[in-house]
Image (cartoon, rainbow, N blue to C red):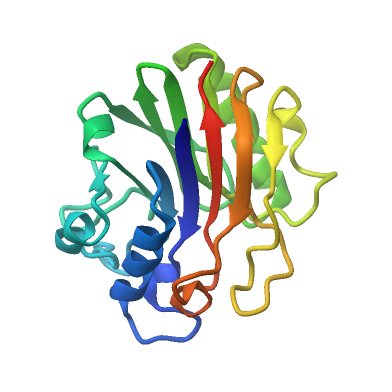
Amino acid sequence: MLKLASYNLHKCRGLTGPHAPERNLAVIAALDPDIIALQEVDFRLGARPEALPRRLITETTGLVPAEFNRTSETSLGWHGQTILMRPELAEQAVIRRMPLPGIEPRGALVLRLPKLTVIGVHLGLARSSRRAQLARITAQASRIAEDNIALMGDFNEWRDDRGLESLAGFRVIAPGPSYPAPLPQFRLDRMAFSTTLKLVRSGVFAGERARDASDHLPIWAEIELP
């Protein structure tokens, strides 16, 4: 069994600031995932320096960041995204970047493990872009992954009946409202699993002052591999 999670950090500024990454790290540590896809881990301007300090991650959470070519030497992620995982999983992991179409620059991270492929995403603000991005992801996944695929991240989609057409072959879950964190109303954060994966339980994490640490609450799911 594996515990997967996704969390938009909002550049570690909570709702309005100040920059306080220790809050986000405390949330991740309390959530205690095996693998977590993170969004908005870097600042937006200039060389996009890390908003979540790499040096604090392992000592605070026990997780390690995936190794791949980042946006810049000072960035933690690519297009603001990274994936953290337990060290024993990192030893087996291979990660690649997947550029995505759309109005604004976006990309997905594809983490390959021996029995599981995890794809971390932060989809665009326009539904037309999100549709094109999901179509690219599912087409690529069928070529580069085995049957066991978990797609997760900030989908930026508040509707259940529109924009997700390319995921017809997946089990799509939105464990509950995750945005805005203080009073969640929208299910922007989602996961999608291939039918070979068994979903055991899932939820939205609101502990360890998660409502103060970001504008999103993290979501999680426990799965069993076949």
Say above or below: 186 vs 77. Answer: below
Q: Nearer the viewer, residue 119 or 64?
A: 64
Left or right: 141 as drawn, with respect to 92: right
Across and down, in percent, residue 105 comes to 47, 50
Q: Nearer the viewer, residue 25 or 133?
A: 25
Count of picture labels: 0
Say above or below: 109 vs 146. Answer: below
Across and down, in percent, residue 35 comes to 39, 41
Say above or below: 145 vs 176. Answer: above
Q: Residue at x 37, y 24 (%)?
A: 112
Left or right: 187 as drawn, with respect to 75: right
The quarter of the displayed image where residue 75 is located = bottom left
Left or right: 208 as drawn, with respect to 203: left
Q: Nearer the viewer, residue 48 or 215?
A: 215
Across and down, in percent, residue 191 comes to 61, 41
Q: Residue at x 28, y 31 (%)?
A: 89
Across and down, in percent, residue 17 comes to 41, 86
Residue 144 visible in the snapshot: yes
Say above or below: 131 vs 136. Answer: below
Residue 190 visible in the snapshot: no
Location of the C terminus by quadrant is top right
Q: Residue at x 50, y 44 (%)?
A: 121
Q: Residue at x 48, y 48 (%)?
A: 5
